[in-house]
Image (cartoon, rainbow, N blue to C red):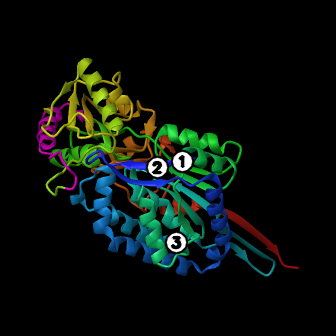
């Protein structure tokens, strides 16, 4: 019996898109076509692969106006923000710029006696399992460098953003990337796991929940298939006594509320030095009250619905539990809050780490704010988490930020910014946030394998 994958729109609860999931046989045939195409793709000059991928991404950009509206219908981000193409373009451009130098052989010796060098080779068939919260950006992080490095790609979109994978693949095909080199596949969990367990892929990149990452590891157990996993987060912000207060408020509130809080590196907890605490709180509450909750297709909306009612239900439950345990909620329920996917953004004080809202991932528009007396207390609280993706430090002193950053258990340290991805820096995490790394030189290293050549002349 065919499984039908359905995207239920958070805008109005309608079924916005549906597609049949590929059968195991259909999926295996697609992977076989990809594997057959890989050698010829890798044999093309690197500059040619880069140019074709860049052209495909340009075509995606030419279609951005309609793609942004589709995205609003699928997962609820206001269309006024224009989708994700800006980041897609910039990340593609950077990975194209560094491809030749990063993938060039490492020359150890070429003499009358020996040739010694290390080359980087593509893994082969790469599976990219994209999430729904940033389906284009997260997919591009792997799809673009994987193709440029000579891999072939199978892209599996999330059901909530069912149309996004096809959009990416169609644009790449239109740009000249061969059809079998990059394919969009609609897969259910059982088929995906079965393919991984059968060693169908040479590398798997997954962005999603901790439970989803654990499922990937179970499927790959014993296959030695390399995995790149970006999973949960509970990213902290720390506002020190010397911080630029207005900039800290603006950036951290935006980091907590943008995309209805559904950001991998969104700010989920804030620690403020006691000397700035009251002023920070007053400004943060005023800024949060100014959000306009509503239909994401309305150009005046600044905060759309959460992607699914079960996600909103989790945030409501965490918030209610915290309030029942003594926390204070500062934002009155907005008129547009329907008790379902349309959710009032919330700031909580009098919170502590016994509360779920300060320890478990919320992935919604709620943030707890705590007063701290010094770096030592802030460090202890920031590290009191099973996650480690980013931490945002607010100070005028870069050396202080680096000293403190060295002690924070996280993949990225920001100073005076948050919720941002720089393609020149590796995107990685610690603890339950996952393993591996995307983008930068290291991203290319993860999408290729080294091979040594030790050639002796006689």
In-front residue for pair 410/198: 198
Image height of 127 relative to 177, above or below? above
In-front residue for pair 37/214: 37
Judged from the image, the secondary structure of the residue bearing numbered disc 2 is strand
CB atoms at circles 2 and 1 under 8 Å apart? yes
How far apart in space, not on screen, are marks 1 and 3 (Cα)? 34 Å
What residue is shown with label 3? 99
Give the percent coordinates (x, y) of residue 397: 28, 48
Give residue 215's quadrant in the image.
top right
What residue is shown with label 1? 188
Task: State which mark lies toward you, 2 or 1.
Answer: 2
Q: Residues within 10 Å of mark 1 (few under 14, many from 20)?
A: some
Magenta stretch bounds: 272-297
Is residue 218 a member of the stretch shown in magenta?
Answer: no
What residue is shown with label 2? 5
In-front residue for pair 354/258: 258
Judged from the image, the secondary structure of the residue bearing numbered disc 3 is helix
Please name the residue shown 39% across and 43% down the image: 405
């Amino acid at each position: 019996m065919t499984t039908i994958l359905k995207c239920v729109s958070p805008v109005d609860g309608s079924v916005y898109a549906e597609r049949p999931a590929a059968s195991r046989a259909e999926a295996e045939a697609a992977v076989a076509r990809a594997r057959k195409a890989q050698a010829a793709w890798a044999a093309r000059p690197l500059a040619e692969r880069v140019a074709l991928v860049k052209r495909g991404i340009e075509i995606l950009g030419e279609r951005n106006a309609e793609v942004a509206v589709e995205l609003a219908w699928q997962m609820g981000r206001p269309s006024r923000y224009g989708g994700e193409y800006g980041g897609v373009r910039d990340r593609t451009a950077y990975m194209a710029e560094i491809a030749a130098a990063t993938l060039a052989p490492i020359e150890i010796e070429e003499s009358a006696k020996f040739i010694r060098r290390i080359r980087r080779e593509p893994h082969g068939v790469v599976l990219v399992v994209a999430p729904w919260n940033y389906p284009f950006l997260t997919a591009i992080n792997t799809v673009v460098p994987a193709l440029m490095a000579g891999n072939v790609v199978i892209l599996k979109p999330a059901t909530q953003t069912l149309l996004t994978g096809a959009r990416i693949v169609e644009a790449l095909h239109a740009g000249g990337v061969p059809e079998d080199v990059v394919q969009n596949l609609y897969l259910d969990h059982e088929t995906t796991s079965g393919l991984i367990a059968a060693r169908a892929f040479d590398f798997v990149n997954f962005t999603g929940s901790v439970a989803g990452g654990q499922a990937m590891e179970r499927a790959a157990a014993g296959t030695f298939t390399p995995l790149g996993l970006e999973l949960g987060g509970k990213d902290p912000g720390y506002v020190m006594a010397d911080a630029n207060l207005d900039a800290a408020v603006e950036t951290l509130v935006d980091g907590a509320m943008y995309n209805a809080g559904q950001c991998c590196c969104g700010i989920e907890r804030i620690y403020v030095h006691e000397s700035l605490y009251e002023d920070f709180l007053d400004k943060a509450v005023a800024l949060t009250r100014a959000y306009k909750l509503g239909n994401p297709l309305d150009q005046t909306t600044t905060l759309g619905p959460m992607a699914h009612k079960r996600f909103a239900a989790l945030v409501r439950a965490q918030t209610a539990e915290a309030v029942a345990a003594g926390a204070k909620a500062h934002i009155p329920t907005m008129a547009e809050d329907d008790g379902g996917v349309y959710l009032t953004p919330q700031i909580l004080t009098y919170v502590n780490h016994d509360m779920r809202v300060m320890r478990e991932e919320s992935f919604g528009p709620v943030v707890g704010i705590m007063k701290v007396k010094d770096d030592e207390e802030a460090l202890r609280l920031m590290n009191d988490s099973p996650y480690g993706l980013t931490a945002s430090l607010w100070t005028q002193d870069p050396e202080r930020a680096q000293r403190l950053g060295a002690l924070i258990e996280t993949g990225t340290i920001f100073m005076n910014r948050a919720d941002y991805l720089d393609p020149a820096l590796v995107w990685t995490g610690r603890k339950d946030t996952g393993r591996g790394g995307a983008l930068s030189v290291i991203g290319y290293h993860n999408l290729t394998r080294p091979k040594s050549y030790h050639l002796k002349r006689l």
